Every structure is written in structure tokens, then in C-alpha cells.
Image: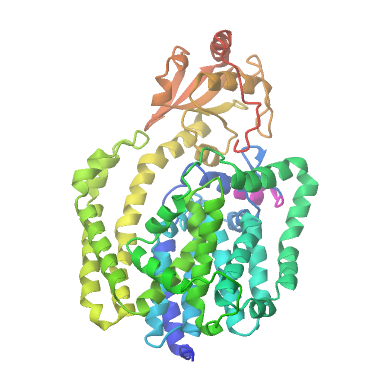
Amino acid sequence: MAPPPVASFQRRQVLLITAAVALVLFGWQLGSSGLVDETAPLFAASARAMAETGDWLIPRVNGLPRFDKPPLVYWAMGMLYALPGQELWNPLGTWAARLPSALACGAVMLALADTLLRRPQRPGRPGLVALTAAFAFGLSPLVLLWGRIAVSDALFSGLLALSLLLGWQTYAARGQGWWRCWLLLGLAVLAKGPVAVVLLGLTLVLFGWLQADMAALWRRLRPLPGLAITALVALPWYGAALVVAGEPFWRSFFGYHNLQRFTVVVNNHLQPWWFFALVLVIASLPLTPLLLLGLAQGVGPLRWSWRPAKPLAPELSLQRFAACWLLAVLLFFTAAATKLPSYWLPATPAAGLLIALAAQRGLGWAWRLSLALTALLAAGWLASPLWVPLIVAPEIPGLAPELLAGGWLLLGGGLYALAVVLGLAQGRSGGAAALLALQLPLLAFVPLVLQPAWQLGDRLRGLPVRQMASALVRQARPAEPVAMVGMLKPSLHYYGRRVVIYEGAEPHNLVNLADRLRTETRPGQPASTPGEQPSLLMVIDTGTAALPFWQGLEPQLLERRGIYGLWRLDRRRLERRAAQLQRQGVAADWRLPRPERY
């Protein structure tokens, strides 16, 4: 028999605490640092362009259409960019760009807690269990990172998590509100694409098999009319984009960003087949042993046939459902050729459920191992004066000494040590209480350690690029072209509000640059000859500037910030150097198809 739902007053208290913690984890100082290169400024610039031009159909960045993701995240950011007073409340552009990710992660924390409050899985302290599940999700290193950056992954993972939780609640409630999960699934498809349907479908198939209740699952979730709802939500934009953009949209979005990413390695993201097993371990530290125990408990004895077996009561099957959810993500992305750590984000809500439910069933070897891992991490932070000086980061000069001078890592070691002490002290009070005691110092780690270190990294790595963007605005002549070579930072385009020609540091990139200036036209940057536009503004890093083929061009150094310099370059000298390299056999390759080009 299922335990009764938590009383409404206690439920409101737990949800209020969860919301307050989510605000600290994902909202605190959200706009106090700049956009993080290299991907986030592309999303932010596309969304801002939508708000400024009124073209809400096709995302565009740096004068080119951007087909890598569907529009939902751009719409969410763009609506915030459309609000007045950006210079006052959003000076760095990051409130508008990051808020959809932060809200999505906060919504998942509330949904996890609410699900366990409405349908407790075991007797005893359901409010604490709900809090520990929400905190286990929010404290995942992956969630803490992607919940505060301006990309689509957190929004997609949040919408998929809400869809899956509503799907399980529909099964537990004998089919009530069956349409809700399919509506949310449609929004998830608008956030990242058809992979949302695949992950939900694979989760339901695994769950129906392990639960030996496929017929009831089908009957209660009504997938055929449900998929029709999903299609009604998602397909109109896809159809309109295909009509307007045509074959380039089809080739880029479906061909490259979906089919090709699954079947072949793209953009050098080659990883071994066991990559996501490692990510699983890292993404739930220091509670990975509890996650593995919860996964084993959820799967239970494996069934190797479709013979009917006695299922769990639907309202008590959440741990099994979470196990199937996590396995669906693991199996699908392990099979994919292209592997990125962010692909694990859709599994992190399931991991939070499994950790909390495993702890609720009792403390044992998994708890002792979790405490040992916490102690090991505490020792690592406390030993930071030994290993931080070994960090080599040419792009962030001065990182190691400033990181040590701030004292944040030593404070982090103290907080992890406190977590061990509190976890040991509460061990006799029960699993949920002990887990919550361990989590509380880790919650304090985010505003006291992680956020100051993040702002240090932004000051050392991001601020020089923003200063270069300001210098562009001050120094640029009318219609003078702008380029960045070597380190390619899209935030230069975002903060400078100029079309920027990006090229790498190799000899063929110099040849590309000269040829593109003369022949490539895009909105905001027409092609021109040296006679029409005799000079070029170029941002170049010190490492690239030291290469022999970039030397001897006699540039005018206008400004220098950090590792970057702003050159005004005579295009005739640039073309003479390009011609010299071409005589040596160096050929331009910028016309070759490059799906990641911006």
C-alpha cells in the first residue's frame, strides 16, 4: 500500500525551501559575469537579433543563419532581450541569455520534490526525501555548470524531465491528465529536436518491459493521440523553417546536427564507447555510490523474456522508472558516435531520484563509500596549494596565483570536511536525514566557492575580449571590416555588435582571410577590394601574432588587453603575404562546407 501524500501545508514548506535553494544555486549573481566563449555568445547573439529585427523564425548570428538548434531557447532569450532598459538590468547580456537555463533547472528541482511529496515511495520522512532528491539533482557538477550558461541543453533537459515525470504520474494515476506529458514533449522537441521523442520512447519501452505492464502503460499514456499533440506543438515551426530556408535547413539541422552527429564523429568529439559510464560517475560526485545502488535497486532482477511478471504497484514504481530513464540516456548516447558531457544532462533528474530513494531504503556500503569520496574531495581541495600551481592555462594568465590568493579552494575543503562530519553525526537518524546533513555544506559551496572562482575566471578570460569589443566600437572607421584570428571568440561579435570574420592561426587561414575580405558578402559585411576599404581591424592573440607568417605585416597596434591586441592592418600587405603563401602551395579552403561555421 502506498504511503499517503504529504499534507498541503508541509508540501508548501518543502517546495518553498526548494525554490529558495534553486534561487541560490542558479539565480544568485546570474548576470554578474559575461558570456562564456565559445558557444554561449552564439545563442545570445541569435536571440538578441530576433528581438531587434523582429524575425522570430530563423535564428541568425554574425550575418549567417544558425540551424543547429530549434527556436525555443532563442524565443525564451529573445523575449527577455525585447524588454526595455537592458543597459541597466542586463549590462553584460547574461541575465536574458542565462535565465531560461536557470529557470529550467529550478523547475526540475521543484518537480522532483513535488512528485515525491504527492506520491511517497516508502513510509518515513517524505519531506526530507523530496528535498534530498531535488538537492542531489541541483548539486550535480554538470547541472551547476549548464544551469548557468546560455545554451539550449538545460532547457531541453528540463522540459524532457517534466514530460517524463508527468508520464510516470499519468501511469500511477491510472491515466489522469495523460495529455500533459505529450504537450511538454512537444516543447522539448522545439528545444533540441526529435531526440526528445526517442529518449521518452526508449524510457517507456524499458519501463514497460521491466515492469511487465506494457499494456497498462500503453492504455494509460495513449501514445498515438499523445504523439499527435506533440506534433501539433512542434511541427509548425519545422515546416515553416523548411519552406523559408529550404535545403540548407534540411541539410544542416537534420543531416548534420541530428543524423550525422549520431552516426559519425563531428567537430572532433571522439570519445571511447565507455565515455558516459565515466560521466555518470563524475556527474553525481560525491554520491555516485548511492546512485549505483539506487540504479541496481530500480532495475531489480533482470527479465530476459516478455513473460508476464508481477509488476510493482504503479504508484510505487518511481525508482524503477527512474532507473529506466537513466538507462535510456546511457544506452542512446553510448550508441551515438559523437559524445559530449552535456549529453548526460537529461539523465541527471533520474540520478537525483535514484540517490534519494536509495538513501531512504537505508544506509550501508554505498553511504560509507559516499562519505569516503566526500572526504577524498575535501582532501583534494585542502591540498590545492600543491596542485593549483601546476595548472597551465595560456589563455588565462595569472589564474593559479589569483586562485590561491582568493582562499576559496581551502574554504571548499573545509565545507566538504564539514559535510563528512555532519553526515557521520546524522547517520543514526536515518538515510534521508543523513543525506540532507551531507548536502547542506555542499549547497553553501556554490555561493561561497564556486561563484567567486567563476567570476575570477571571467575577469581573466572574458573581460579582455569584452575590452577588445569596446575598442572595436571606438576605433572602427565606417564600413571597415573586422576579423579575429587565432583564438576564435564569438563574444567579440556579441559585445562589439559587428560582423566578425573568424579564422584560425595556420597559414591557410591568412590566405582565407584575404580572399574572404575580397569575395565574401554577408549582411553587415560586404565584399570589398583594398582600394575600396584599404584597412582591416584585427584582434589577434600573442601566440598567433608570434607565428612567422603573421609577422612583418607592419600593423598599427591600437590597444592591448590581456593576451589580445587590436591591429589596424593595411590590406595590401595582407594580400601580398597571402599571394606569397599561395606561391608556396598554401590554398584557401574557406569555401568548403563547414556546418559549424559562424
Does 219 sit above or below residue 456?
A: below
244 and 52: which is toward the camera: 244
Identify the residue at horizontal 59%, vertical 62% (top origin).
199
Residue 230 in sight here: yes
187 and 522: which is toward the camera: 187
Identify the residue at horizontal 71%, vertical 42% (top origin).
251
- Residue 326: image x %, image y %? 50, 64
- Residue 432: image x %, image y %? 34, 78
Residue 103 in sight here: no
18 and 234: which is toward the camera: 234
Q: Quadrant of the C terminus?
A: top right
Could you tell me what secondary structure mostly forms the magenta stretch?
helix
- Residue 27: image x %, image y %? 44, 62
| Number of dots carrying numbers | 0
Q: Is 528 on the left or on the right of 328, as rendered?
A: right
Does 69 sit above or below residue 147?
A: above
- Residue 303: image x %, image y %? 53, 72
Identify the residue at horizontal 40%, vertical 83% (top origin).
127
Q: Is 283 on the left or on the right of 69, as rendered?
A: left
> Magenta part of the protein: which range?
47-57
Residue 48, magenta (yes or no) = yes
Does 25 sit above or below residue 596?
A: below
Identify the residue at horizontal 44%, vertical 66% (top origin).
351
Where, by quadrant of the figure, is residue 71 drawn? bottom right
Does 274 sit above or below residue 323?
A: above
